[in-house]
Image: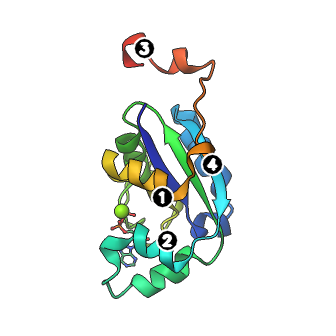
Amino acid sequence: MEQTLVILKPSAIDRGLCGTIIARLEQKGLKIAGMKMMQLDEPILREHYAHLVDRPFFPSLVLSMSRTPVIVMCLEGRDAVSVVRAMTGATNCRQAAPGTIRGDLGMSGQENIIHASDSVENGKIEVARFFYPNEIFDYSTVTTKAIYATDEL
Ligand code: IDP
Ligand code: MG
């Protein structure tokens, strides 16, 4: 099944929102294939946010993303990348639709609570960036048959 990378950013850690966010993702029916806490530093952030390194806010983004440890998650499910992206909402929390994680839980463009992979290809690259292969678990849950129809598995 498709996998996507989620980061619970320092804004989520600082504000004690991790449990709330993980509960929403679990309740949706996404399976946690990997999860750990880690401290991000500038080298990994330059790689992860390579598309933003030349933007004026990049130094502030690095400080923001390394202010506390983060929780990284590999979530698995049918169309997991687009499903989690939709749950995440627009980049700026003030413009994110109500019902999305950013729309419900934040007020900032930068301090926007959560990262989610934006394409299937980037999902694979990002899971490999943050997890060693033996940190991703292949298991099935008893609820799988209630979450999906047979032809969706
Ligand atoms: P995304 O997280 O919705 O995919 P990206 O454009 O990939 O958005 O930007 C990565 C992160 O960089 C954002 O989540 C946000 O924290 C930060 N960011 C993006 N644009 C701005 C900006 O204009 N000012 C400050 N921070 C920004
Ligand atoms: Mg992005």
Q: Quadrant of residue 144?
A: top right
The answer for how far apart the CA atoms under marks 1 and 4 are is 13 Å
Q: Mark 4 belongs to which amino acid? A: Met
Which residue is the site of mark 3? 149
Occupied quadrant, residue 11: bottom right
Amino acid carrying mark 1 in the image: Arg
How far from the left and from the top, in percent, is residue 77?
A: 46, 32
Foreground pick, 25 / 123: 123
Number of residues whose C-alpha sits closer than 10 Å to that of mark 2, classed few (under 14), some (14–19) or many (20 or more): some
Q: Residue furthest front?
A: 133
Which is more N-terminal, label 4 or label 1? 4
Residue that label 2 marks: 44
Identify the residue at image location x=53%, y=31%: 29
Question: Viewer-nearest of labels 3 and 1?
Answer: 1
Nearer the camera: disc 3 or disc 4:
4
Please name the residue shown 38% across and 67% down the image.
92
Q: Residue 129: which disc?
A: 1
Which mark is first along the chain, 2 or 3? 2
Q: Quadrant of the N terminus?
A: top left
| Number of other residues with Cα within 10 Å of mark 1, as a class: few under 14, some 14 to 19, many 20 or more | few
Q: Are marks 2 and 4 in contact (CB under 8 Å)?
A: no
Earlier residue among tags 2 and 1: 2
Instruction: Estimate the spatial distance between the alpha carbons at disc 2 and disc 1, rounded to whole Å.
Output: 8 Å
Label 4 CB, ligand 1: below 8 Å? no
Task: Report, in whole angstroms, how far the alpha carbon at label 3 lies from the one at label 4.
Answer: 26 Å
